[in-house]
């Protein structure tokens, strides 16, 4: 682990020294951020560290922590100390990582930035007055974040293992007839985290709730006829996320057959996540796959070409295929095609696509096709698309099941992608 981290740090130093040379900077300060408070309250919002600062350390950063970078020098970690009997102490973590750093401790009132050079840029929230404006710096460093180091991939593999353990526990809770809340609690216990530590609020939807893409509620009442569970939940390892979705059916029926066929399609897409592939092409391949499933399962009688021309697949699969994954669940730079910040935005064929880049080795992405029975979209289809070819009686049959999403986290490679999620589930069997 030490060797992986040291190699990771060397890559970051090189990236940021190149940025300083490009923009003519003498130093860059990365700020973790400060805690914020609820209105008229002394209780803070859950704290999320700025990813650019978290990337540098092999442990979870807290608020009011700063990193100072200067060319040719060890990075400086400015660690916050405070006189506080209300909270637990926050010592600097021990470990071999310290040999690569200069560490100073500072109270909030200390002027630790007093000797910084004039050409110092700031990345993070709440910039201080001493920092110079440097337009383009954030885009310059964000672009490189998409390609993960071996240390980052190792950390995300650990997050995947914990996430997979949680999903298996959630499945057992579902089969035992538990409520959405109890299923979520089972996930949290098995993945060894609290709800505040999740990389994103876990989605737990039974039956029709599985058709709500970001279903945010968790019913405390068990259902007498829970037939479907869709759970989209991950784990956090030192700021790095896993983002996993599984759909489970209680009965071996025609909806379960639809789940199995979507799962097969999803794995084919994962195998296609190779260097040089444009992610837009993978999304288009997904639309073709959805159209094929709709026809094979007698949901839509139109052939694939007719479905595509009438945008039928988008009725059942309205979101994008996936996104970059890392220190943020929807990691930065998904629409950015160069260091200068040039953007390639989604088009009307896939307006919600979060990744439009050409894939490169060691990017980590999600692959998450879905097939949902969403009343609002189905009503719109009937109103706006003449001769849609869909069997509304069969759709009525599937409405109580909600929908399906299968999501894996994949490391892009030149020849054979690495599926962190499938590896994690295999290790738990």
Image (spheres, rainbow, N blue to C red):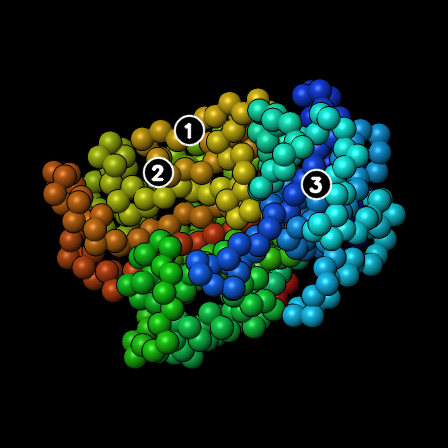
| Residue named by callout 2 | 288
- Would you say 33 lies left or right of 248 here? right
Q: Earlier in the sequence, mark 2 or mark 3?
A: 3
For mark 1, give the secondary structure: loop
Q: Nearer the viewer, mark 2 or mark 3?
A: 3
Name the residue at 56% across, 72% down. Answer: 189
| Residue named by callout 1 | 345
Q: Earlier in the sequence, mark 1 or mark 3?
A: 3
Measure how far apart labels 2 and 1 are at the Cα level.
Answer: 21 Å
Task: Look at the numbered discs 2 and 1 and tell me whether their residues touch, using CB distance below 8 Å.
Answer: no
Specify the farthest residue to the right. 99
Measure how far apart labels 1 and 3 are at the Cα level.
Answer: 26 Å
For mark 2, give the secondary structure: helix
**Between 211 and 274, which is closer to the camera in this rendering?**
211
Q: Within the image, what quadrant is residue 421 found in?
A: bottom right
The crowd level at tag 2 (other Cα within 10 Å; few <14, some 14-19, many 20+) is: some
Q: Quadrant of the C terminus?
A: bottom right
Indicate whether 89 appears above or below 271.
below
Residue 80 in sight here: yes
Residue 271 in sight here: no
- Would you say 133 lies left or right of 171 here? right
**Between 243 and 87, which is closer to the camera in this rendering?**
87
| Residue named by callout 3 | 149
Percent coordinates x, y for residue 155 in the rendering: 68, 52
Percent coordinates x, y for residue 178 in the rendering: 40, 78
- Would you say 69 lies left or right of 137 here? right
Count of all numbered marks drawn on residues in the image: 3
Indicate whether 319 appears above or below 46.
above
Name the residue at 29% across, 47% down. Answer: 316
Task: Look at the numbered discs 1 and 3 and tell me whether their residues touch, using CB distance below 8 Å.
Answer: no
Measure how far apart labels 2 and 3 are at the Cα level.
Answer: 33 Å
């Amino acid at each position: 682990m030490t060797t992986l981290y040291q190699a990771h740090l060397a890559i970051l130093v090189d990236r940021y020294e190149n940025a300083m040379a490009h923009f003519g900077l003498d130093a860059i300060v990365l700020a973790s951020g400060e805690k914020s408070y609820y209105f008229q309250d002394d209780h803070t919002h859950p704290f999320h560290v700025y990813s650019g600062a978290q990337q540098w350390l092999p442990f979870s950063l807290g608020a009011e922590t700063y990193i100072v970078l200067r060319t040719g020098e060890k990075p400086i970690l400015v660690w916050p100390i405070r006189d506080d009997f209300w909270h637990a102490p926050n010592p600097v973590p021990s470990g071999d990582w310290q040999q690569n750093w200069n560490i100073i401790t500072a109270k909030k009132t200390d002027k630790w930035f007093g000797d910084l050079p004039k050409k110092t840029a700031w990345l993070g929230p709440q910039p201080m007055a001493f920092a110079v404006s440097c337009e383009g710096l954030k885009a310059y460093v964000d672009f490189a974040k998409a390609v993960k180091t071996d240390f980052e991939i190792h950390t995300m593999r650990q997050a995947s293992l914990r996430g997979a353990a949680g999903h298996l526990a959630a499945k057992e809770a579902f089969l035992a007839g538990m409520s959405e809340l109890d299923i979520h609690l089972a996930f949290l216990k098995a993945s060894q985290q609290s709800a505040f530590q999740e990389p994103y609020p876990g989605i737990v939807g039974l039956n029709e709730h599985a058709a709500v893409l970001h279903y945010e509620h968790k019913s405390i009442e068990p259902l007498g006829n829970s037939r479907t569970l869709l759970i989209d939940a991950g784990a956090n390892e030192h700021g790095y996320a896993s983002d996993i979705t599984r759909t489970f059916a209680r009965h071996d029926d025609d909806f379960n057959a639809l789940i199995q066929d979507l799962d097969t399609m999803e794995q084919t897409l994962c195998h296609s996540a190779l260097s040089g592939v444009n992610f837009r092409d993978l999304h288009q391949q997904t639309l073709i796959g959805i159209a094929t499933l709709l026809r094979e399962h007698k949901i839509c009688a139109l052939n694939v070409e007719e479905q595509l021309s009438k945008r039928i697949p988008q009725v059942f699969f309205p979101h994008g295929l996936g996104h970059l994954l890392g220190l943020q669940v929807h990691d930065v730079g998904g629409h950015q095609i160069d260091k200068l910040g040039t953007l390639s935005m989604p088009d009307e064929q896939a307006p919600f696509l979060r990744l439009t880049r050409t894939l490169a080795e060691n990017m980590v992405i999600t692959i998450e096709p879905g097939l949902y029975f969403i009343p609002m979209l189905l009503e719109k289809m009937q109103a706006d698309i003449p001769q849609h070819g869909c069997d509304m009686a069969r759709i009525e049959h599937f409405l109580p099941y909600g929908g399906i999403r299968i999501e894996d986290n994949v490391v892009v490679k030149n020849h054979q992608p690495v599926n962190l999620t499938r590896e994690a589930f295999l290790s738990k069997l």
